[in-house]
Image (cartoon, rainbow, N blue to C red):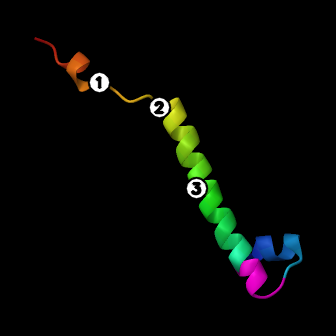
Amino acid sequence: MYNAFKVSSNLKGSKSIWLFILGIIISAKISQILIYSFVTPVNLDQLIIN
């Protein structure tokens, strides 16, 4: 994945490494936010059948 990023962005050296790491972190946070927005928290009290 890094090699594809390096070739497509035409960057070299430490700048490409830092941008790749930053991109991975940002995409992970965005995916966490999106997944949490689609999956609503479940109230366990409603699931208990008396």
Q: Residue 18: x percent and y percent?
A: 69, 77
Cα–Cα span, label 3 and label 1 = 26 Å
Which mark is first along the chain, 3 or 2?
3
Cα–Cα span, label 2 and label 3 = 16 Å
Q: Amino acid at mark 2?
A: Val
**Residue 11 on the magenta segment:** no
Q: Mark 3: few, some, or many residues within 10 Å (few <14, many ≥20)? A: few
Q: Amino acid at mark 3?
A: Ala
Q: Which mark is residue 43?
A: 1
* Residue 44 appears left or right of 20: left
Q: Which-is-in-front pick, marks 2 and 1?
A: 1
- Residue indicated by mark 3: 28
User: Does dot 3 land on a helix, a strand or a loop?
Assistant: helix
Q: Can you tell which quarter of the image residue 12 is in?
A: bottom right
Q: Residue 29: x percent and y percent?
A: 57, 53
- Quadrant location, the N terminus: bottom right
Q: Mark 2: few, some, or many residues within 10 Å (few <14, many ≥20)? A: few
Instruction: Say which residue appears at 17% left-offset and 18% top-offset.
Output: 48
Instruction: Say which residue appears at 58% left-offset and 47% top-offset.
Output: 31
- Quadrant location, the C terminus: top left
Q: Can you tell which quarter of the image residue 49 is in?
A: top left
The secondary structure that dominates the magenta segment is helix
Residue 1 seen in the figure: no
- Residue indicated by mark 2: 39
- The furthest residue to the top: 50
Instruction: Say which residue appears at 47% left-offset and 31% top-offset.
Output: 39
Part of the protein shown in magenta: 12-17
Which mark is first along the chain, 1 or 3?
3
> Is the residue 15 above or below the residue 41 in the image?
below
